[in-house]
């Protein structure tokens, strides 16, 4: 089994995502792909088409705002500084379009907003479906769109926002000058680890040149050996992309391999830039086992990401989180009894304010980093795929285990302990945000303990048993 994002638990319930492979995709803004085009008319009657500006080589800033939004008002002077410095009256690098995304706002209100904040850039009130196309769900939302249709979401506010915006503008890719060029925009298989004997590569290719592409051949290379060729005969216009599933590959040995994609006969010519044919390492495990990585996000989920590494090679990763205070579970294929490193990252270097991340094998936590242990740009923990191995030396682990009965229950559980010698310890119960709901001391020799969560909401909780030389955790469910 490959790495699979399995479940997302939040206060709004269970969310299920479906991936559909298409022949040619014209994007929604979903964290990959290209910025969708639009044509809108501003409050002064002038038309603005996004791709027209991009084709002129300009970087375009999209400012999704609402006239009543206090944060938008606080940011407005800094947006004005960016426009004055880099816009038509400055270096002419950018165009900035401010899109009022509240349908209840009138043209006059939008005009007055621009006057009040002395905003000289175009303001658009009738935005149609554009905010939905850009997945705008809060104000303000800023995107920096590069001439090649790639984009950067800006998360900062006021001065920090201005700094991020200028950095994104300065680093934006320029218009392409290569005539016939295909690149691998991204690929999802085979990436990281696979618990199967075969797979079909899945990748997103993009026309990254000046000409329309009507024919090419995609070669798949494994460990520097050509294993398949796939003819592609659909029309791709410049910057348009296509999602593909290539022929199945089987017969590889268990272990690490390297995959590369190459493009030949691009419009009957050589690929104009072979260097952008992305590939990488992947781990194939014929007898692999499944662990789960459970990340509980804080209020700033887009800042958080994680990786599992084996001797520096990436076995799995998770990013692009959008829902705060949510438990996200990702299944990962690994080798039993092997050891790995879990690294959690924070984009802005201040860690996470709540929640945490755990690695679970056979319903036991074998690796864990809580919010209290993570207040920098990254933190890590080593773990081995052995039940009960979380953060302790296996030779020091006591002969102690516990089970919770019944599970699920209506909120009342019994913790039953077993072992040659039951030491002193502590039992705690936490919810998915890391908030402690229950705590009690375990007395030496005690074999049964009652846990009462009758006043708690329906959902998932975690029982921890901590002694001098072990930490064990089990998941329990309150269901009425």
Image: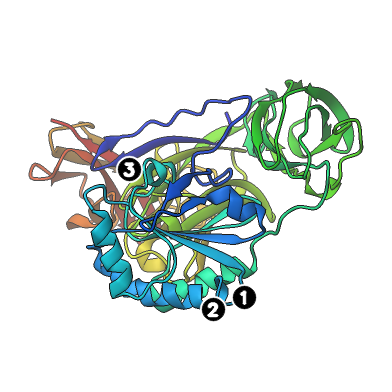
**Which residue, given by chain and number where applicable, does mark 1 sit on?**
91
* Pick the front one: 158 or 246: 158
**Which residue, given by chain and number where applicable, does mark 3 sit on?**
474
Q: Is residue 50 shown above or below 6?
A: below
Q: Is residue 235 left or right of residue 74?
A: right
Calculate the distance from the C-alpha at mark 2 to the C-alpha at mark 3.
57 Å
Contact, CB < 8 Å: mark 2 with mark 1?
A: yes
Mark closest to the chain's N terminus, 3 or 1: 1
Mark closest to the chain's N terminus, 2 or 1: 2
User: x, y (%) of residue 125?
Assistant: 33, 53
Q: Is residue 130 shown above or below 143?
A: above
Q: Is residue 94 shown above or below 158?
A: above
Task: Report whether residue 72 is seen.
Answer: no
* Pick the front one: 373 or 463: 373
Q: Is residue 87 shown above or below 412?
A: below
Q: Is residue 431 left or right of residue 151?
A: left
């Amino acid at each position: 089994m490959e790495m699979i994002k399995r479940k997302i638990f939040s206060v709004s319930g269970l969310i299920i995502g479906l991936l559909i492979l298409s022949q040619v995709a014209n994007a929604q803004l979903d964290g990959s792909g290209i910025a969708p085009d639009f044509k809108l008319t501003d409050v002064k009657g002038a038309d603005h088409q996004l791709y027209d500006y991009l084709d002129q080589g300009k970087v375009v800033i999209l400012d999704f705002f609402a006239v009543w939004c206090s944060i938008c008002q606080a940011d407005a002077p800094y947006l004005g500084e960016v426009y004055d410095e880099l816009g038509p009256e400055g270096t002419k690098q950018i165009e900035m379009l401010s899109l009022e995304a509240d349908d209840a706002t009138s043209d006059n209100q939008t005009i007055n907003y621009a006057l009040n904040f002395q905003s000289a850039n175009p303001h658009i009130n009738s935005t149609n479906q554009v905010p939905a196309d850009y997945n705008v769900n809060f104000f303000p939302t800023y995107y920096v769109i590069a001439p090649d249709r790639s984009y950067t979401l800006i998360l900062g506010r006021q001065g920090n926002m201005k700094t991020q915006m200028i950095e994104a503008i300065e680093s934006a890719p320029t218009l392409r000058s290569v005539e016939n060029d295909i690149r691998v925009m991204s690929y999802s298989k085979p990436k990281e680890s696979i618990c199967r004997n075969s797979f079909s590569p899945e990748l997103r290719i993009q026309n990254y040149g000046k000409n329309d592409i009507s024919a090419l051949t995609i070669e798949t290379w494994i460990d520097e050996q050509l294993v398949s060729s796939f003819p592609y005969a659909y029309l791709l216009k410049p910057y348009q992309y296509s999602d593909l599933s290539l022929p199945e590959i089987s017969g590889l040995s268990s272990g690490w391999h390297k995959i590369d994609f190459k493009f030949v006969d691009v419009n009957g010519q050589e690929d104009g830039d072979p260097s952008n044919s992305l590939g990488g390492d992947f781990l194939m495990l014929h007898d692999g086992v499944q662990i789960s990585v459970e990340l509980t996000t804080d209020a700033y989920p887009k800042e958080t990401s994680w990786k599992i590494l084996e001797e520096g090679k990436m076995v799995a990763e998770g990013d692009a989180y959008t829902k705060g205070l949510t438990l996200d579970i990702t299944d990962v294929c690994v080798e039993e009894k092997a050891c790995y490193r879990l690294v959690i990252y924070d984009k802005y270097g201040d860690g996470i304010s709540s929640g945490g991340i755990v690695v679970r094998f056979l319903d036991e936590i074998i690796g864990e980093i809580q919010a209290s242990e993570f207040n920098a740009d990254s933190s890590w923990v080593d773990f081995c795929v052995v039940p009960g191995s979380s953060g302790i030396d296996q030779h020091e682990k006591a002969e102690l285990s516990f089970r919770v009965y019944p599970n699920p229950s209506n909120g009342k559980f019994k913790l039953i302990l077993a072992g040659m010698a039951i030491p002193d310890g502590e039992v705690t119960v936490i919810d998915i945000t890391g908030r402690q709901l229950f705590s009690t001391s375990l007395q030496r020799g005690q074999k049964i303990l009652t846990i009462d969560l009758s006043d708690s909401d329906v959902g998932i909780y975690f029982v921890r048993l901590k002694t001098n030389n072990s930490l064990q955790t089990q998941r329990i469910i309150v269901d009425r």
